[in-house]
Image: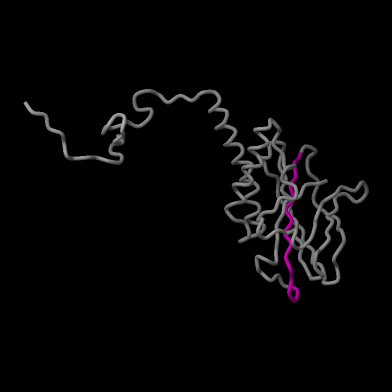
Amino acid sequence: MAKTRSIIKFSGTLSGLTFVDSKTYGAHARAKRGTYKPVSLNQGMKESGAAQKQVNLIAKVIFDAVKGFAPGFKDGKLWTRLLSVFRQQHKAGKSYSYHDLNTMEARNEYPSAKHGSFRITKDQNQGLLLHYQLQKQDAYRLSLLRIATDESLLLLYPSETLTIDLKNETRTGQFHIDFSVLPANAQTLYVLHCEQLANGVPTGLLKSKGVRFLVVE
């Protein structure tokens, strides 16, 4: 009896079966992974998955804070860059920390460095100080957000902010950061938002603002 070959071809997935046509095995159906044998992960894959989950949670704390602090400024690249920092720390066998985020710009195409230089230091008598040196003799509004967590970088303490308006003739200076006291083991990251003012009001233009991360030097 002559054999016939079906002219009906399937593609895609139907009822848990994926229809494929490969050079090696020809047209065949492939059951979903784990249908007949339990899917098992080796120890390395399990550890990698756990680390990725932790990195995602740490980055989300920062990403969400920036989104609320500077609405409309962050972009999708920030999330990827945050993940990259913490992944590199894990790969290097280092404890997760905010240290490697110091001076990182939220958006490289609109850097705060275009408007000035900023840093935070600790003074024995005055506590924390925000130092600024503006590039232009323009009026600016500087806002500072403190993100504080426990040692795991996952338990978030209440965030605090402060704002100061600088007049046109003010280009260099410093001011005291007066935030509440945190537990001794708290980890802190500061987010600086600078924006040019026109007649005492923020211009609203992306090119007139910048957001960067700072840690205490």
Q: Residue furthest right?
A: 125
Q: Residue furthest bottom?
A: 199
Q: Residue furthest front?
A: 23
Q: How is the image coloured?
A: one colour
Residue 211: give x, y in percent of width and height.
Answer: 70, 57
Which residue is at the front of the view, 11 or 35?
A: 11
Quadrant in which residue 6 is drawn:
top left
Residue 84: give x, y in percent of width and height.
Answer: 63, 42
Quadrant in which residue 92 is drawn:
top right
In the rendered image, the vertical position of residue 175 relative to residue 7, given as above or below: below
| Residue 201 colored in magenta in the image | no
Which residue is at the front of the view, 139 or 67?
A: 139
Q: Main secondary structure of the magenta part?
A: strand
The residue sitting at 57% across, 32% down in the picture is: 50
Quadrant in which residue 68 is drawn:
bottom right
Residue 135 vs residue 124: left or right?
Answer: left
Q: Residue furthest left?
A: 1
The residue sitting at 87% across, 58% down in the picture is: 174
Q: Where is the N terminus found, in terms of image quarters? A: top left
Residue 127: give x, y in percent of width and height.
Answer: 88, 49
Number of marks present in the image shown: 0
The residue sitting at 75% across, 76% down in the picture is: 199
The residue sitting at 68% across, 30% down in the picture is: 93
Which residue is at the front of the view, 208 or 51?
A: 208
What residue span does the magenta drawing correspond to? 186-200
In the rendered image, the vertical position of residue 67 relative to residue 209, given as above or below: above
Residue 23 vs residue 38: left or right?
Answer: left
